[in-house]
Image: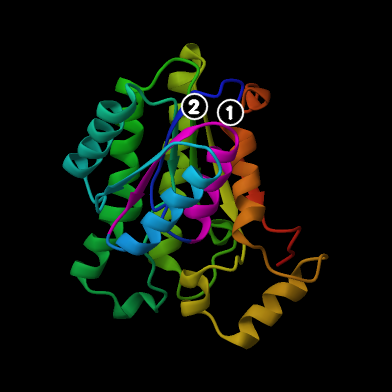
Amino acid sequence: MSSPSKIAVVTGAGRGIGRAIALGLGRKGASVVVNYASNHEAAAETVAAIEAAGGKALGVQQRLDGEASVRALFDAAIEAFGRVDILVNNAAVARFAPVGTFTEAEFDATVAVNMKAPFFALREAAKRMEDGGRIVSISAAMTAVGRPNTILYAGTKAALEQFSLAAAKELGHRGITVNVVSPGATETELYFGLSTEASRAEAAKRSPFGRIGNPKDIADVVVFLCSEEARWLSGQVIVANGGAIG
């Protein structure tokens, strides 16, 4: 950050990539609102780690699934810190299964978290973020490849990419940049819970580095996009997958 007083809201920041992003922003001097849905212990650990490094952080429990929950999150951030300069849309849910197996309730629940909440977060940022702000949303590299059993998750992430590209054009006149980071296979609880050892080994082989990513690999890209040095990057989908092919 160019200033030690930037205020960042990171959704889904208790664990995994979100936690790594929150820690990275904290190390750069941002005060971080650590949003989480239910895991108090993980969120408290994230807040404590930021504070132990000399930063400021606030845990805010809010399952983001629509307009009201997003507004409440922004209210909490502004009440605590006075404004919002950075938004990272990271919170998501996933179920990988054949299209014929999904129920309407599963569709609605996934769309609420992965599409509806980020949309209203973009809306709140447009209304309440300081000029010169930064918005980064986390997508998934599978939006470009059409893998079996990913139809609902990948579809919601593709929508998030389009929201972001349009928002970049609308908000640029205020100096606000809007970008997307699209990770490939990454060492998170979500990925490990939905993959097999064999599939992870195959994913590692697809990268010339011979491994899958880790949360810090992704967080470092996000933290850069939130910096002053990234002021000329907007409307971009940055695929952070270690050069994976196929």
Q: Residue drawn at (46%, 13%), measured in percent from left and top?
A: 174
| Image quadrant in which you'd find residue 160 | top left
Frontmost residue, 160 versus 194: 194
| Image quadrant in which you'd find residue 97 | bottom left
| Image quadrant in which you'd find residue 88 | top left
User: Could you say which disc has been placed on residue 64 in the image?
Assistant: none
Amino acid, disc 2: Ala
In the rendered view, does 188 fall on the left or right side of 35? right
Frontmost residue, 65 versus 187: 187
Q: Which image quadrant: the N terminus?
A: top right
Residue 138 in view of the camera: no
Amino acid, disc 1: Ser
Contact between marks 1 and 2 (CB within 8 A): the answer is: yes
Q: Residue drawn at (29%, 30%), measured in percent from left and top?
A: 80
Frontmost residue, 138 versus 166: 138
Q: Kindly identify which residue carries mark 2.
A: 168
For label 1, count other residues whose C-alpha is less than 10 Å away and answer few (under 14), some (14-19) or many (20+): many
Find residue 99 and report its horizontal and vertical position in percent. Answer: 36, 74
In the rendered view, does 60 fall on the left or right side of 57? left
Numbered range of the magenta stretch: 16-37
Residue 120 in view of the camera: yes
Q: Kindly identify which residue carries mark 1.
A: 234
Rendered position, 142 above or below 237:
below
Find residue 235 and report its horizontal and vertical position in percent. Answer: 56, 31
Check residue 127 for magenta coloring: no
Label 2: state its secondary structure: helix
Check residue 19 for magenta coloring: yes
Find residue 140 and report its horizontal and vertical position in percent. Answer: 53, 57
Q: Residue drawn at (48%, 25%), measured in percent from left and top?
A: 6
